[in-house]
Amino acid sequence: QAPDAIAASRRRFIRTGATGAVLTLASGSGMATVCTVPSGAMNSRSPLDNTCTGGMSPGYWKNHPEAWPNTALSKTTTPFGSVFQSTGSMAALPLLDAVSAESDLRKAADPKNKCFHFTATYLNILAGYVKFLTVDQLKLMWNELEVYNAYVPAAGAEPWGKDQVLDYLDSTYHESI
C-alpha cells in the first residue's frame, strides 16, 4: 500500500477501534504509533510511562535474525505452536518462517498473516521494543481470535475482528526494514 493509504487506514482504525488510546508520534517516518494496551488500560486517561519506542516489523525480524532476543528460542526450529496454541501446519511453522513474507511455508500455513504479525509482536515484547503489552496479553488476543474469531479489548467494548487486531499489531511497528 502507498504511505497515504496506510496512514488513512491507521487513522480510521484509531477513530473506530482504539477509543481512549494514548498516541505518540514516531519521529522519522511521521507515522503515529499506537501506545496503549487494548484491554483494561483503555479506560485510563493517564499517559502510559514514556516507554513507547515502537516495535519492529516482521520484515525486520526476518532480515535481522541476529537481533532476536537472547532467549531459548531457536529461530529456525522453534515452532509457532510452541508459543501460540495452534494446530496443523501453522503449529509446525518455524518462527523465522512465520515472519517471512516470502516463505512458501508461511504462505501455505498462514494465508491471512496472523502468525506473521503475532510473531513479530511477540519478538517486540521480548526485545523490550513494545512495553505496553505483555506476552500473556498477546496470547490472550491470539486465543480469543482462534476460539471466538474476535477479541474483546475491554469490558463492554465492541469486539475486534481479525482485521482490527492485525491493524492494531501493525500499528505498533515503528521500523519496517
Image (cartoon, helix red, strand yellow):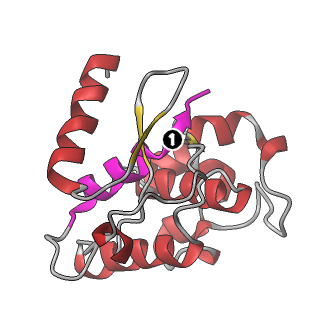
Determine the image quadrant of residue 24: top left
Please indicate whether residue 106 sits to the left or right of residue 163 in the image: right
Relative depth, front residue between 71 and 51: 51
Image quadrant holding the C terminus, namely top right
Q: Is residue 76 visible?
A: yes
The number of callouts visible is 1
Left or right of residue 52: residue 159: left
In front of the other: 55 or 26: 26
Name the residue rendered at 35%, 52% in the picture.
Answer: 168
Left or right: 15 with respect to 167?
left
Residue drawn at (32%, 67%), measured in percent from left and top?
42
Indicate the amino acid at tag 1. Tyr
Q: Position of residue 74 (x, y in %)?
A: 80, 61
Region in magenta: 160-177
Q: In this rendering, does residue 86 appear at all?
A: no
Image height of 88 relative to 23, above or below? below
Q: Quadrant of residue 148?
A: bottom left
Percent position of residue 11, x then y: 23, 36
